Image (tube, coloured by chain):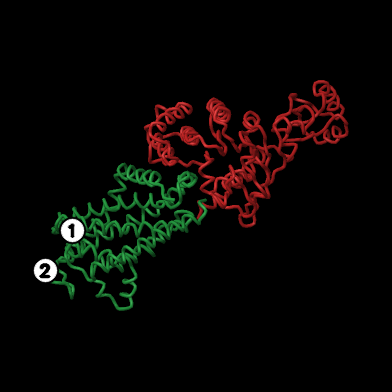
Chain colours: A green, B red
Amino acid sequence: MIQPAAIYVLWLREMLKFVRAKSRMIGAIAMPVFMLIFLGLGFRRVEFPGLPPEIGYLQYLVPGIVGMTLLFTGAFTGMSVLMDRQFGFLKEVMVTPASRVSIVLGRIAGGASTSIIQALMMLFLSVLLGFALPSLPMIAASAVIMLLISVIFICIGLILSSFMKDIHGFNTMINFIIFPIFLLSGALFPVRNLPVAIQFLSYLDPLTYGVDALRGVLIGYAAFNIWLDLTVLLLTSVALVCASGYCFRKGEVL
Amino acid sequence: MDTITLNGLTKIFGDLTAVDNVTLSVKSGEVFGLLGPNGAGKTTIINMLTTLMIPSTGSATITGHNIEKDPEGVRRSIGIIFQDPSLDIGLTGRENLDFHAMMYGIDATERKKRIAEVLAVVELTEKADVLVENYSGGMKRRLEIARGLIHHPRVLFLDEPTLGLDAQTRRKIWDHIRDLNKKHAITIILTTHYMEEADYLCDRIAIIDHGRIIALDTPDGLKTLLQGDVVTLGVNGAAESLVPVLQEKSWIREVNLHDSNLTITVTDGEKRVPDLFALAQVSGIAITSVSLRKPSLEDVFIHLTGSSIREQEGRVRGHMHAGMRRRMMR
């Protein structure tokens, strides 16, 4: 059922293309970099009620922007299936003996690797703005959380793309699904400051727990218990991997 | 032994029946051709057989594996060269081949050997390490053919394998296809709308029009449907009046008029040419050219469908352009 060779091929393909497409890499992290610079500097002196005063806004913002990077790069790589469909390469993959599950896992492996690389780049770039990096074990722990977050959003991208036949619906998906996920997650401000009704939506958003867990390990401040965050992330990612495997096995390719 | 069997295979898109109740079987080691104009349903048949589409009704098996119940079993025993491009243009030619071979679990040394082999066949050895986005159309086509040959499948599907290739490359590919079929005993199904390709390569041919099989036989068997030689007369002006005159003659089997060409199927063609001239003269029609040949598959196609494959294609292409314009205006 699971073929390591097929997973490896798809991962290798993603990595090769990532290394070659410098413009894609710069394009993908340009927006989070700008947000970090302008929000981080512009709101430097803002104090949120309920936040300990020793945590400045930049410290608070960096894990949020790292989460955002994972959200966007993950969803994009998930939806790059649509590009492959457009260029016909999807057919080529789908007629090989590789099982659908392996194809999905290969895409997740490739997408997660590139997403994590970009998120770590963001993290290190933020040091230039004055972000205080935690110890190495904490950075390593954050990489595990990054993995869970990127798996979740790659799967969401994969599931969405299995319902779309071409790339026309792409922008709609970004505007109506990806942006709300980002804004609800508390990446920019504490979720607790939202009206209660909207808070409820935030608690359904997996990125809320992802960003919170990243804060926990990167700046030592989190709204929830880290184990709660990790449990939610782990369960969500397992469920979504199964769901995307199912969507790929069921649908016709053409 | 039958390697491939189709049993009432049907595919319906909305109100269009693209493939209409197709039943046939392909013997092991056979080169089987699906011949027909664009839009006849050939590619849809291939898509169902390669598990990319699910049939509306009917079933099919390949090397004993049912296409719906055991798609992975089917995929393990087949290879396909698609009609439309299906390369990763962000990778080099060699990477495209290597990744494909890896998906089939071929080990590294064997991969290297086979890649060198197929690259030589399609003459892309020197361009192997160039990104595919820098390839010309013909080079991409050749690379796809190379890719389809790497993993030596038991059944190979070729969907319009030589579309858009020059005559020289086409001949090379044909020879390689024959070679694969003979040396490795690969069963081959190919779709084509080139008559000479079907004639040269296929053991048996199914002629398909509007999703149905309208004839199925060996190339020679199909040609004997015409029972005669084909005389083509180029005529000046209105030749319609000549058609009924010719149709009365017992030695004329069939008359078709296309623009200013009269295609006439006659027994003993050599002896009948003077008679044809005499008949034309009586009707006051000037003959500008004449040719006599043994029947080709093209003639069989005209005989069966009442129009030439190129005319049909023109019509289909007209529709396609209208569709593309509509899409671009959106």
Where is A12 relative to A239, above or below?
above
Q: Amino acid at mark 1?
A: Met
Q: Tag 2: Cα neighbours inside 10 Å, few (<14), some, or many (≥20)? A: few
Q: Amino acid at mark 2?
A: Glu
| Foreground of the two, B324 or A202 | A202
Disc 1 marks which residue?
Answer: A138
Residue B96 placement (x, y as % from top left): 41, 38
> Which of pointers 1 and 2 indicates the residue nearer the eye?
1
Q: Residue at x 87, y 27 (%)?
A: B282
Res. B119 image quadrant = top left
- The extreme bottom residue here reads A196
Pointer 1 and pointer 2 on the same chain: yes
State which chain disc 1 sits on: A
Give the left or right position of residue B107, taking residue B3 as reference: left
Res. B289 image quadrant = top right
Residue B222 placement (x, y as % from top left): 73, 33
Give the left or right position of residue A170, taking residue B73 as reference: left
SS label for mark 1: helix
Where is A154 relative to B25, above or below?
below
Of pointers 1 and 2, the one earlier in the residue sequence:
2
Residue B256 placement (x, y as % from top left): 77, 35
State which chain disc 2 sits on: A
Disc 2 marks which residue?
Answer: A54
